[in-house]
Amino acid sequence: MSKIFKFGGASVNSVERIQQLLPILRSYKDEKLVVVISAMGKTTNALEKVAEAYFSGHRDEALRLFQQVKDQHLTTAKYLLVRNYLAAEAQLRDFFTEVEWLLHDKPVRDYDYYYDQIVCIGELLSTSIVAAFLAESGIENQWIDVRDMVRTDGNFRDAAIDWDYSEQKVREEVLPLLQESNIIITQGFIGSTSENESTTLGREGSDYTAAVFANMLNADDQTIWKDVEGVMNADPKQFPEARILKELNYDEVIEMAYYGAQVIHPKTIKPLQNKGIPLYVKCFLAPALPGTVIHSKSLKDLPPIFILKQEQVLVHLRSRDFSFVGESGIEQLYHLLAGIRIKPNLMQSGAVSLQLCLDDRIDKVEKLALAAAELFDVQIERGLTLLTIRHYDEATLDRLTAGRQEVLRQQTPSTVQVLMR
Ligand code: ASP
Ligand code: MG
């Protein structure tokens, strides 16, 4: 009965791109659409800088940086709007004022709280402009503040959705509006607490919000509109031979995300999978192309999918007295990892040693090395590359490891991982 669309920051980062939304939305004019739109371009990063400056006591710098965000949005609105300009400007100014009030006070709460109050504005501004522009272009729509529907806990910057409350609200608010109007425009990535404080769901969280709507509204499908033609079997910047995967399933996407592919926010899959709602990834620059469909069916004959992770570090732990590492050594190590909140990308245990491959997050790796040194002899090697191939064949494996020195390998029937120098 309804479709969920999500447009990312790149699809609304210029006047021309926003105008591109018209033909796409017109081609779905007989459908009921809930459209989730991200902040324009790099606005979220710019707002993060505002929050940092404010919290570190540089109020003037924060106001100056915020002025740039304001100017950018006002300029875009001016280019796009005539008849609706004044109304849209008033709406933008209300959001500006919310932030400026806050910037004039001294911070008394923790950083994450202020981060969310400031950063949430990005999606409110972009959706206000787009909604006004669509209306002025003859695409009647309803704009809603998603914070009135998506209730979260107070875990700022990584808030968890109160599913029951939000589901009821989403249905109450969205379904009647969809009777009146074919298009609803709203925000991803943000929500609010029961105290009406704004929250965010974690960077790149808009895909997830869209999936939450899809689940709660029992949507027919969800489409993520991107600047690429679909999901590819490798990063084309690293592998020019990368190609589009026409079809994937939820499990495969979760696996790809786990091994480090920057495909779709991993939290996005579960709400769709639970209701068997297909996810399309399509290109807003070429909407006629089929893109990728992700569903629950099992798939045979997937081509090799490869993922490279750079800046890996190998931590080699050796028992001091050549005694077996044993279960208590492993237990202590897991305990350390959980305490530091670091997840190994690969782990191999032997009689007297353990090897871990991790992302080189200097602070965390140092902490781990220091703590582990109380139990083991510790050696660290940096600057390694981790290659993962799903559905590998020998030829692909040979080609991608040619000329590299292998440090460690792990292999199952479906996946091979090689850590290389
Ligand atoms: N605007 C947010 C971000 O850049 C959320 C999103 O686009 O998904 O992280
Ligand atoms: Mg984005």
Image (spheres, helix red, strand yellow):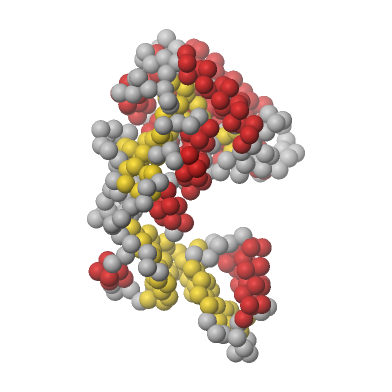
Q: How many marks?
A: 0
Q: Residue at x 66, y 77 (%)?
A: 328
Say which of 21 and 77 sits in front.
Answer: 21
Q: Quadrant of the N terminus?
A: top left
Q: Quadrant of residue 419?
A: bottom left
Say which of 79 and 321 sits in front.
Answer: 321
Q: Quadrant of residue 108?
A: top right
Q: Residue at x 67, y 33 (%)?
A: 193
Q: Up-down: is 254 above or below 226?
A: below
Say which of 382 and 163 sits in front.
Answer: 163
Question: Is 234 on the left or on the right of 85, as rendered?
Answer: left
Residue 260 location in percent, x, y? 44, 57
Task: For residue 110, say whether it is visible.
Answer: yes
Residue 52 location in percent, x, y? 61, 42
Q: Up-down: is 404 above or below 260?
A: below
Residue 339 location in percent, x, y? 66, 63
Question: Is 154 on the left or on the right of 14, as rendered?
Answer: right
Q: Quadrant of residue 141?
A: top left
Residue 199 location in percent, x, y? 62, 36
Q: Quadrant of the C terminus?
A: bottom left
Q: Residue at x 45, y 15 (%)?
A: 181
